[in-house]
Amino acid sequence: MTAEIFDRGYRQYGGERTGVPGAMKTLIRYSVRRSLGLGRSARFKLIPVAIILFSFTPAVVFVGLAALLPDVIGDEFLPTYAEYYGFIVTTLYLFAAFVAPDLLCTDRRTSMLGVYLASPLNRRTYLASKAIAVAIMLGIVTIGPPLFLMIALWFEGSGPSGFGEFFLDGGQIIASGIMMSAVYTAVSFAVSAATDRTGTAIAGTIGLLVGTSTVATILAESTDLGANIRLMNLLLLPVELAFRIHGEVGGFEWQTISTTNMWLAVSGIITGSSIWVWSRYGPLLVRR
């Protein structure tokens, strides 16, 4: 067989040049797909699908009971939108623990980080894209279930009484979900930035969330440090602040803690995590 060489010459790229925004959008889309297990084998889909289904299950049950047994199930039986988070708090921190480590640690361990940084992305835009992807994933379980509960109950007749209340409740649900997603994303990012081992980061995130909850409860109940010591509870602080966003008060132990202090604690967590993550990624030696 005779080989032939065809000289095609230089051909200029004629497609759309999307630059940094386009690169970020592509990375966000890819990261969300990876987190959902799309394009991967079935075992990678099992955990995200199971967690999402578990987070929606209580909402489906409550809507079904309200629709099928309206005379038996009164409004006092149905949880408020803030109380709903108590049913799914476990799915929230498990999702946070699994999503971020899979996206961050894998890139460093496989040297894919260098490939991304060889594109229009730099370290800041790379981290921002990953953070947005994690927040989107967490938003599925922090915003989706209570929003579904509100809309379904509204159509059924047990939800908001008018359009004004409908949009008020919807706004509070979205604001609560964004806040919770931001906090859990910050915590999982902080742990994931400390190691390139996915399993270690998953265990570390779960340990940090559950550990701070245990330590804060013990200190608050056995010492004279005051109720504000509960603000170090990374697991329940976002849930309790969600009650305040909805105009309610959560657990009895949190009633003496001001909403301002809760917002300051949340801001401190996000800021501290950002500084820590950048201190790890800023000087990181990357092979391209």
Image (tube, rainbow, N blue to C red):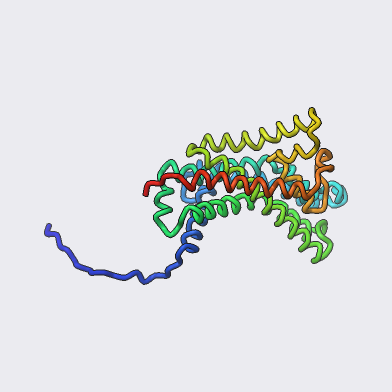
Q: Nearer the viewer, residue 194 or 181?
A: 194
Q: Is residue 120 left or right of residue 278?
A: left
Residue extending furthest toward the top:
222
Q: Position of residue 163 (x, y in %)?
A: 80, 66
**Is residue 61 visible to us here?**
no
Q: Position of residue 238 (x, y in %)?
A: 71, 46
Q: Is residue 241 left or right of residue 275?
A: right
Residue extending furthest toward the left:
2
Q: How many marks?
A: 0
Q: Is residue 218 left or right of residue 141?
A: right
Q: Position of residue 197 (x, y in %)?
A: 49, 37
Instruction: State which quadrant residue 157 falls in.
Output: bottom right
* Picture residue at 68% right of the left edge, 35% below the top: 212
Instruction: State which quadrant residue 18 falls in.
Output: bottom left
Q: Nearer the viewer, residue 45 or 7?
A: 7
Q: Nearer the viewer, residue 119 or 239?
A: 119
Q: Position of residue 63 (x, y in %)?
A: 76, 51
Compared with 47, 223 (above or below) is: above
**Is residue 23 visible to us here?**
yes
Which quadrant does the N terminus fall into? bottom left
Q: Nearer the viewer, residue 68 or 132?
A: 132
